[in-house]
Image (cartoon, rainbow, N blue to C red):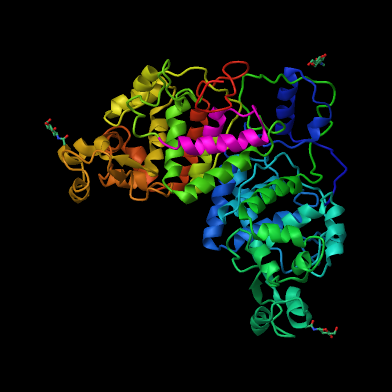
Amino acid sequence: MAYSSSSSSWPFFFFLLVSSLCMFGMNISTTTAQLSPSFYSSSCPNVLFTIQNAVLTAISNEPRMGASLLRLHFHDCFGCDASILLDDTSSFTGEKTAFPNANSVRGYDIIDTIKAQVEALCPKIVSCADILAVAARDSVAALGGRPWIVQLGRRDAKTASKNDANTNLPPATLSLSGLITSFSNKGFTTKEMVILSGSHSIGQARCTTFRSRIHNETNIDAPFATLRKTSCPTSGNDNNLAPLDATPLLFDNTYYKNLVSKKGLLHSDQELFNGGSTDAQVTAYSNDNPTFLTDFAVAMVKMGNLSPLTVSSLCMFGMNISITSAQLSSTFYATSCPNLLPTIQAAVVNAVSNEARMGASLLRLHFHDCFGCDASILLDDTSSFTGEKTAGPNANSVRGFNVIDTIKTQVEAICPKTVSCADILAVAARDSVAALGGRPWVVQLGRRDAKTASMSDANSNLPAATLGLSGLIASFSTKGFTTKEMVILSGSHSIGQARCTTFRSRIHNETNIDAPFATSLKTSCPTSGNDNNLSPLDATPIIFDNTYYKNLVSKKGLLHSDQELFNSGSTDAQVTTYSNDNPTFLTDFAVAMVKMGNLSPLTGSNGEIRTNCRKLN
Ligand SMILES: *[C@@H]1O[C@H](CO)[C@@H](O)[C@H](O)[C@H]1NC(C)=O
Ligand SMILES: *[C@@H]1O[C@H](CO)[C@@H](O)[C@H](O)[C@H]1NC(C)=O
Ligand SMILES: CC(=O)N[C@H]1CO[C@H](CO)[C@@H](O)[C@@H]1O
């Protein structure tokens, strides 16, 4: 919330970045001041993973930290420039001691830790304001919320204003009209104010902030007030904490449910449901968690973009950037279908909660479509056309087509004839992995759908479960992957199941297999029959983690091709490393998936945007 008007000396690294942009030659005009999700993609490609990793660590040490990091970003915003992080000095009074912040804003140490890690990775590149913005997103996602794409490129304030913090941040004593005004001053609608108040879905508050409500107010559930009074008497115990809603470690719509039953903790919370104009919206969210999660994600993007400090004017003298239409971009649908990503994610989360195995199926569908991600795998056979669905590696094993159809129908309803089936597959794979514990990656978009499909390509390109190590290396190498990347992508077998036919000979005939493990599988997969009986690909088939590699080290790989990665060959060391280091595996997997998703896509005017993923237009 502090606005620095000076822009004296730009660091050298930044100068380089800007001048290379300028060389291409294209008009930037006023848009130079805008943030971009790919701001650090070449200057600090691993920054997002580094921050997410640190946030997950902090939250697993103390789950409440998720709410603290969200609050830190929120209190910094209303001008996201990291001014809140500045310590007071003898000659400077910052925002930390402003009334809405003192004794309540926390998490500074975590931000310091993240900043130190980021500096080690990319010195003097990434702003503290951007770290706050990403950490808030990752906190919400870690506690059950829907992640959003964080726009990046903020710079840090050179000053801070305790006075601004005191006047701008909405206190817990505000009435509905005061809340509306406070948010309106920052450009938010009343609806967005109600949405952003949902950040109180997680976290706790101190007794001082709700004392008068529980002792003096009447629009409060009586047993709830009585319960709260035990730890927050009329005086004393100022710092005792109470949860802001009934599920303070879960980011969901319980906050709104509580308001409807008059169990809002803060006066300003209950004002949202007190016979006023916002009651209807509170009721709607109390009945519809997915819509709340989506709306919250959208509103957070807006909040994160409040008057950031950026590099405007550096590039204003008429340069041209050449945007090559043939390339994929994470913002490809930003204007043509802005709600695409939340729509797909909601559908994937829904499908995975109906059937956890679907997460693995959607990942596998993208993988089998790739080696040229063009949605050719989705085409149904017709009397005059044989597609890929019945190819050996796909028949009886690839599934999830109905889920993709459902998503496609929803996407066509919001943005007709705009989004390719290939892009839907790519996003659904990412969201599946994230829903099961993996690390989300930024999906590059702009693929177009194939006008044909090749059963013989599918038969010859897709790696079979019978392959040896050298066959696996060769198969992935054909598509431009290193051996290391092959080992990483094999980690997709961290989730899902396989049919008896694919592992029968391994469990009955191979010797590099744990004997009790083989015995346990033979019951449901005898030497003949029961071909379609399923077994999990690793011991935790609905959690995306490194258990797959741990199992390989103990000779419990299910498929022949899995155990080949740890069978006294050149990849043993990497398998051992991943078996001991889940965070590194998750990060490496995310990076490799971006590469896989970008394999020879159709772009520009090639292919088409199918309206039905099963048929050519
Ligand atoms: C309740 O209201 C009375 C009258 O305004 C006030 O004196 C008292 O301090 C309030 N109690 C609390 C706990 O806020
Ligand atoms: C095991 O190997 C023998 C000899 O190659 C073969 O005849 C048999 O079919 C194999 N058994 C299974 C279950 O694959
Ligand atoms: C300075 C410059 O080269 N400007 C060019 C930018 O690109 C447009 C067309 O996209 C040209 O018309 C400008 O002359």
The region drawn magenta spans: 399-426
Relative image position of residue 264 (x, y in whole percent) = 70, 70
At a point 75% along the width and 59% down the height, the residue shown is: 280
Q: Quadrant holding ligand 3?
A: top right
Q: Is residue 113 visible?
A: no
Q: State the residue at coordinates (53%, 47%).
A: 349
Left of 509 or right of it: where is 366?
right
Picture quarter containing residue 416?
Answer: top right
Q: Residue 573's image quarter? A: top left
Foreground pick, 309 / 486: 486
Quadrant where the C terminus sits is top right
The reply to whether the magenta stretch includes residue 122 is no
Q: In the figure, 250 relative to 392: above or below?
A: below
Our reading of the magenta stretch's main secondary structure is: helix
Please determine whether, in this image, residue 64 is positioned above or below residue 30: below
162 to the left or right of 528:
right
**Residue 154 position within the rendered picture, expressed as x and y whole percent measured from the top left:** 74, 42
Q: Is residue 49 left or right of residue 1?
A: left
Pick whichever, 567 or 145, lies toward us: 145
Q: Is residue 411 magenta?
A: yes
Question: Residue 88 location, x and y as percent?
Answer: 78, 61
Query: Where does the image place residue 484, in percent across and percent down from the top left?
Result: 40, 32
Q: How many marks?
A: 0
Instruction: Inspect this view and state whether residue 577 appears.
Output: yes
Identify the residue shown where x is 57% and y is 39%.
Answer: 46
